[in-house]
Image (cartoon, grey):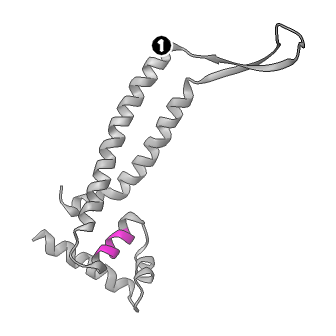
Amino acid sequence: MNLKECLVQYCDIKVEVKNLEERIVDLEKDNNKYSIVQGSSLEPPFCLQEIKISHIDFKKAKEIEKQKCILDERYFRLLELQTKVEEEISKLPTSRLRMIFEFRYIDNLSWQQVAWRIGNRTTEDSIKKEHYRYLEKIDC
């Protein structure tokens, strides 16, 4: 996969990674149910205390673990792709290009925000042109 293809997918990958993280946490919570009951100790002083009792459905736990494995595998594949994009950005020939690509794709900034971050009277249009010219150049 080349830089262009990676960049096209990068924003979607970040969103999917976040969603997978949430789904994995939800799955882990799903089978960890418990009840709180009150009771006292068997010996004096007989103090009333709350006791937490766990409920685990082992059949359901097994299925949840399968789902979690599938999500984990997908999650790590996406993290690898994310790392690949960041490595490709690191290989760009100039500091200015690296900043443009990093601000635009990794930090998910608008073109105007990228121009402001770079400063030096840089305009939104000049940043976009530089970005697209570089992508066209590497496509040859």
| In magenta stretch: residue 16 | no
Give the residue displayed 14% in from the left and 71% down from the top.
Answer: 138
Residue 55 left/right relative to 92: right
- The outermost residue toward the front is 44
Q: What stretch is highlighted in magenta?
A: 98-104
Residue 15 x, y percent position in the rendering: 42, 52
Q: Is residue 56 above or below residue 118?
A: above
Q: Is residue 134 above or below residue 8?
A: below
Is 40 or 66 nearer to us in this picture? 40
| In magenta stretch: residue 103 | yes
Residue 87 image-quadrant placement: bottom left
The overriding secondary structure of the stretch rendered in magenta is helix
Residue 86 x, y percent position in the rendering: 30, 61
Is 90 or 7 nearer to us in this picture? 90
Residue type at tag 1: Lys
Give the residue displayed 23% in from the left and 63% down from the top.
Answer: 88
Q: The C terminus appears in which quarter of the rendering?
A: bottom left
Q: The N terminus appears in which quarter of the rendering?
A: bottom left
Residue 66 image-quadrant placement: top left
Residue 57 x, y percent position in the rendering: 54, 14
- The outermost residue toward the left is 140
Residue that carries the numbered disc 1 in the rendered image: 59
Q: Is mark 1 on a helix, strand or loop?
A: helix
Residue density around tag 1, few if under 14, some if 14–19, many if 20 or more, within 10 Å: few
